[in-house]
Amino acid sequence: METLNQLAHGFSIAFTPVNLMWCLVGTTLGTAIGVLPGLGPALTIALLLPITYQVAPEASFILFAGIYYGAMYGGSTTSILLNTPGESATIVTALEGNRMARSGRGGAALATSAIGSFVAGTLGTLGVAFLAPVVVKFALSFGPAEYFSLMVLAFITVSAVLGSSSVRGLTSLFAGFVIGMIGVDLQTGQPRFTFGIGELLDGVDVIIVAVGLFAVGETLYMASRRYAGKDEIVPLKGSLYMTAAEWGRSWKAWLRGAAIGFPIGAMPAGGAEIPTFLSYAIEKKLSKHKDEFGTVGAIEGVAGPEAANNASAAGVLVPMLTLGLPTSATAAIMLSAFQSYGINPGPLLLTTQANLVWGLIASLFIANVILVVLNLPLIGLWVRLLKIPAPQLYAGILVFATVGTYGISQSPIDLVILYLLGAAGFLMRRFDFPTAPVIIGMILGPLAETQFRRAMTISNGDWSVFYTHKLSLTLLTLAFIGLAGPHIWAYIEHRRRRGPEHVPGDA
């Protein structure tokens, strides 16, 4: 009952004219960004982070959440009509969606994608509203040792999920640690990694790091991979609505996708890629039309993964809001926005920033309704966005990134750092090092250091505090399994394939 009262209060905040305007702007911009190949919500939110210096927190996060949800919707358009996933989470949608478009059923593919996204997004947002208070009650039992162990677990799992290998992910995470340590140590008063530069005594602004790695680095990477020629856009044929048979084949897939996506997204090692592939595999196994998969396109292969994608996007908000743990690149950027406001997400956020949290959750329900209206009737407009020349698009992103960063403090040093980080972001993308763990390490690294120091102070320097507390020991054990488990399993599989070794002298 308390959750319903808080949600009603959230709607009173979200329905104010200003916040409704920001919600509309966010969903529209997010849909457009999702449609454009190569761009994504993380890059866009990073580009808009400087507005946090001018706009109220509620408005900013309603805007960012609208962009996040909108990109999940818009990415399916590119996947279906262009066979080019706008986001990694929409890779699976392209498998069947583009085949449906080529066989003249593109309208049905777009319809099941939009409606499935609405259903799963709504169910996922309900999950956030009712699950977040439960997680908070559990998290309030954490002490410094448990928080440190939880962050170690998050570092290991998130770095493995967001990178192609755990080594690359942990390397990026360590780079974030180093950047986060730049400045004056608040406990000792000693400068760290400032190299005598006075501007670095206050540390590097997380907004500059986010914009440099995601906006500048990603743009340089996309521009470097631009090839001559044009991708073929499959023209829409027939109606944008589904037949009764297609409705019958879609609604169960929507519910299954939502049931798969939300819990995986809410895990500290969640994300959207795993549930979308899992949903596709399940739909392919359960479908009565297996012959359509990989040939003319099966509508279940679009409905299920798209629902899983949007439900997991909602699930990602649970650990971010209640524990301060981002499990996706976009969540990492949103966490940096919290930092710019001086707000630390965690168990106390729902009480200390109730207007912000419940206004944000309520706005997600509104955003889902707006997105259905934007995506079905206006599909022709979104398709036209694919004709924007890439050079102008990339140049515009770099201009906005430069102007926005300079506007923070009017410091030339900030621009130098921005483009140095942009070059580093380009090299990381070029050699397949994930950039999101850098932001996670930069934000959570100093927090983990603080919790570690507190735990050691309370225990008078006794390291056993980390393994005598049962919850802390459990979290550290899970972290070890996450780090060593894949290597142990790979070794066992390798030995199993080789079979028993032949010993010389045996008959």
Image (cartoon, grey):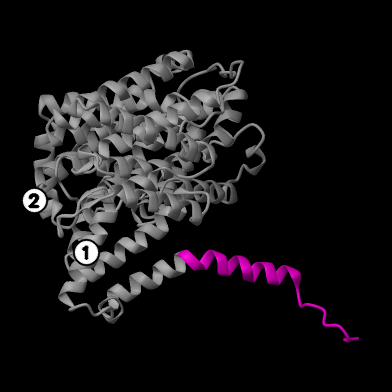
Query: Where, quadrant-wise, is the N terminus in this rendering?
Result: bottom left
Q: Is 501 placed left or right of 268 in the picture?
A: right
Comparing 223 with 360, the one in front is 223
* Displayed quadrant of residue 487: bottom right
The magenta stretch spans which residues? Answer: 483-507
Query: Where, quadrant-wise, is the C terminus in this rendering?
Result: bottom right
Comparing 229 with 307, the one in front is 229
- Does 167 appear above or below 9? below
* Displayed quadrant of residue 41: top left
Q: Residues within 10 Å of mark 2 (few under 14, many from 20)?
A: few
Percent coordinates x, y for residue 86 in the rendering: 47, 30
- Does 143 appear above or below 210? below
* Displayed quadrant of residue 381: top left
What residue is pinned by disc 1?
A: 451
Q: Is 456 placed left or right of 280 in the picture?
A: left
Q: Is residue 475 visible?
A: yes
Asked which secondary structure carries label 2, the reply is: helix
| Residue type pointed to by label 1 | Gln
Asked which secondary structure carries label 1, the reply is: helix
Q: Are marks 2 and 1 in contact (CB under 8 Å)?
A: no
Q: Is residue 303 visible?
A: no
Percent coordinates x, y for residue 367 in the rendering: 26, 32
Percent coordinates x, y for residue 462 in the rendering: 24, 80
What residue is pinned by disc 2?
A: 352
